[in-house]
């Protein structure tokens, strides 16, 4: 089993305990989200292709969360698509914080930004691309603002998404794409 390490060891302000999230990829359609603390190691099975992995404090509680991009169908969206799952450390165990079937449009990619924002590159039924920021509110992710709308070409949209996201990186999170 190959291990892809994109985790981040941090001292959590609330728990005063080092923690590391990482993704271990077993095959194209099976990965494990692994949480290691000073005293525990817990794993969450991800029986889907993983296309993205980020860490950061999504919900503003002072502890680092894991954001995993998976490709799967959902009960409400029967077509295969990119989804965003967010996990937290709850007493040394990996627990879901939010397992969204959709943000706004069809998710292409995402990044965690300083200030708790998740920047998403999305496309709509008009096949145009938008760059949108979302933030945590009580139970899940909600729209915060459009960065850019109605981009026609995917390569230009992705270039703008990467450029706009890079300038907002927080020194307290690690980013990367989980691959084998």
Image: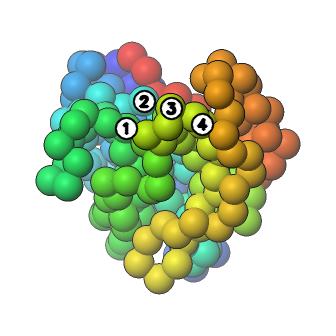
Name the residue carrying label 2. Answer: 51
Is 170 left, or right, of 60 in this rendering? right
Q: Quadrant of residue 158?
A: top right
Expressed as whole percent of the image width and height from the top left, the position of residue 50 reads 36, 32
Name the residue carrying label 4. Answer: 129
* Mark 2 vs 1: CB contact within 8 A: yes
Query: SS at mark 1?
Result: strand
> Which residue: 37% across, 67% down?
97
Name the residue carrying label 1. Answer: 82
Expressed as whole percent of the image width and height from the top left, the position of residue 152 reads 65, 28
Q: Quadrant of the N terminus?
A: top left
Mark found first going from the N terminus, 3 or 1: 1
* Mark 4 vs 2: CB contact within 8 A: no
> Which residue: 27% across, 19% down?
28
Q: Give the camera-side residue of 61 and 90.
A: 61
> Which residue: 37% across, 53% down?
102
Task: Report how far apart the C-alphas of labels 3 and 1 lie in the structure.
Answer: 16 Å
Task: Report how far apart the C-alphas of labels 4 and 2 lie in the structure.
Answer: 19 Å
């Amino acid at each position: 089993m190959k291990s892809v390490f994109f985790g981040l060891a941090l001292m959590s302000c609330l728990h005063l305990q080092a923690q590391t999230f990482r993704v271990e990829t077993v095959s194209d359609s099976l990965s494990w989200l692994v949480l290691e603390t000073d005293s525990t190691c817990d794993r969450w099975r991800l029986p889907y292709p993983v296309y993205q992995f980020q860490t950061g404090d999504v919900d503003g509680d002072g502890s680092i969360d894991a954001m995993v991009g998976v490709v799967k169908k959902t009960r409400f969206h029967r077509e295969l698509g990119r989804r965003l799952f967010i996990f937290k450390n709850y007493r040394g165990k990996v627990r879901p914080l939010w397992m969204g079937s959709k943000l706004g449009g069809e998710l292409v990619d995402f990044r965690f930004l300083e200030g708790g924002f998740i920047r998403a590159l999305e496309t709509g039924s008009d096949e145009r691309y938008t760059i949108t920021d979302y933030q945590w509110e009580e139970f899940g992710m909600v729209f915060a603002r459009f960065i850019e709308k109605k981009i026609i070409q995917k390569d230009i949209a992705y270039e703008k998404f990467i450029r706009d996201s890079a300038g907002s990186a927080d020194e307290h999170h690690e980013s990367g794409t989980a691959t084998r």
